[in-house]
Amino acid sequence: MPLTIGTAGHIDHGKTWLVRALTGKDTDRLPEEQRRGISIDLGYAPLELGDGRRLSVVDVPGHERFVRTMVAGATGIDLFLLVIDAGEGTRPQTHEHLAILRLLGIDRGVVALTKIDAVDGDTIALAEEEASELVPGVEIVRVSARTGVGLDELRAALGRVADGLEHARAERPTRLYVDRSFTVTGFGTVATGTLWSGSIGAGDVLRLEPSGRDVRVRSVQVHDRDVGRAEAGQRVAVSLPGVERHEIVRGEALVPDGAYPTSYRLDVSLEAIAPVEDGARVVVHLGTAACPARVVRLDERFAQLRLDAPVVAARGDRVILRAETTLGGGTVLDPLPPRHRDASRVALVERGDVAATISAPVRIASLSHLLDGELEGVERAGEWVFSRAWLTGYEDGLRSRIATADPIDPGVPLPADEWAEDIVPRLAFERRGAKLYLPGAVATLDGREAEAAALERELADSGVRATKVPDDELARFLEAKGRLARLADGYAIGMDAYEVARDVVVMESQTSGGITLARFRDLVGTGRRDAQLLLERMDADGLTRRVGERRVLRRSAARSG
């Protein structure tokens, strides 16, 4: 099983010298590192255990100014190699590096007690006792990178720790956080990183997130060796044609399109080792990214991290929170949370009871980042999921609105929400056009008979003159009963008068082949506006159609006439 080891420890305690002695490779590759004799950036080397297994080593800087770089290297490793100078014992960065490893959930490793050739036995024993108190239960190996004493024992100890490690990363979608990019002649831009999960091979098309760019992998190497496909847990270098070096920066991730959320907010269970106040400004480390953020405390256990820039995250990822020093860390519970504060919802998500967090409809696809399998305990319609309690409450709300609706049209408009087409058929109502009604509901005047009668008398007295009717619902009801004809702009005419006007149009059209607006106005004895409204209604009814300045009968109307 491919595994990656990360070094940890205070500056000048011999991490890089020890890696060089174990692997034969100097991980201080930068001229400035070689000039100053300290590690500044991350270094990488393959480690042969001697039993046929080959591990990857990430060597990190020990200076307090480069803790940010240390975190970038530590994320994604499987076990640690904590290096302690036997002559100095534990120092500030020993403790901080160990705290970071614990916050990242990396609790398996080996302690290398270095430079034993430079101190006496009593000093070594004191340092060993101090180390055993600091990391109880972890194997401690005395070693000298200069003389080679203890190197075989250290390899064996690392092998024993590796024997007990298991992970399911290979089954998850590919995720490679970039920690370095550079240009190689003949290959173009190369990006490197520890492959967190999945696999990666030549020809794969991936997405560079959060920049949102599609890239194609030309070739893959593991520690300078070409491979057909790299597996989770390996140090990987990928050649990406068509991409400039400056277009890939530390913190971005190569992932399949849509496999992982990219978010400005993270709900986390918080583990603080120093005070983290509500509203505190911190740097959030996730993968190889380091992003400024504001902490929104939900309660003592949970917080929402509101990031200044998006990061690629998944449920279960570990984050580190730093300011001047390391303040704590956390586990991502929801990489796409709502913005509002809701500790109870986050507690349910932590417990795995995602269904209990759902009320109003949400797309099932939007919950994929929280689910390990099928979502149970909720209703489903099309691409939406919702709670039975929400559906019942929504139906009750519609019934209340219908109870107060005008009896002339006892319905309510269809919901304008995106989920309407999928969920409306689940509601206990009849859909008629753009409204919902109680099953079997019929329109009634229900006490408005006198108002309707008065309107009908007014229309009868007006003859073919159009009358403004401000109550559109009443007009619709009477039209459905055949007692008036509605015209445009809120006007109406009595049905008897409309039939007279209709007969005039039919007879004149049959005699003269059509009728003009002026001729129709003169024949029915009304004004131009009313004549226009009547002719437009006859066009809408399919009786006539306009040809130039005249109306002519449609074929169906001419045949029936």
Image: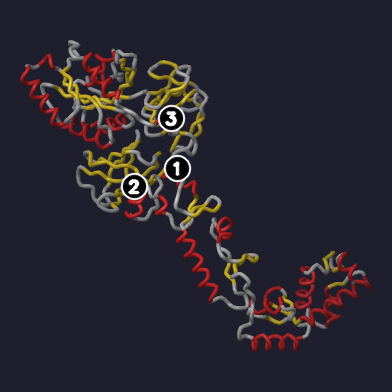
Per the rendering, the mark at residue 198 is 3
Q: Residues within 10 Å of mark 1 (few under 14, many from 20)?
A: few
The image shows residue 411 at horizontal and vertical percentages of: 59, 71
C-alpha span from label 2 to label 1 = 15 Å
Q: Position of residue 258 (x, y in %)?
A: 49, 39
Residue at 70%, 78% (x, y): give it. 491
Q: Nearer the viewer, mark 1 or mark 3?
A: 1
**Left or right for 190, reference 504:** left
Mark 2–mark 3 Cα distance, whole angstroms, equals 24 Å
Please give the label number shown on residue 373: 1
Q: Residue at image x 49%, y 46%?
A: 365
Instruction: Specify the amino acid type for callout 3.
Output: Gly
Residue assigned mark 2: 350
- Name the mark nearer the viewer: 2 or 1: 1
Residue occupying the point 28% across, 39% down = 320
Which numbered disc, 2 or 1, marks the residue that appears first in the sequence?
Answer: 2
Q: Are marks 2 and 1 in contact (CB under 8 Å)?
A: no
Residue at the extreme top: 147
Image quadrant holding the C terminus, namely bottom right
Q: Earlier in the sequence, mark 1 or mark 3?
A: 3
Disc 2 is placed on an element classified as helix
Q: Please tell me how crowded label 3 is: few (under 14), some (14-19), or many (20+) other residues with Cα within 10 Å.
A: some
**Labels 1 and 3 touching (C-beta < 8 A):** no
Element type where label 3 sits in the image: loop
Q: Quadrant of residue 155?
A: top left
Quadrant location of residue 100? top left
Above-or-below relation of 30 to 389: above
Amino acid residing under circle 2 = Glu
Quarter that holds the N terminus: top left
Which amino acid is tagged 1?
A: Gly
Label 1's element?
Answer: loop
Q: Is residue 80 above or below residue 410?
A: above
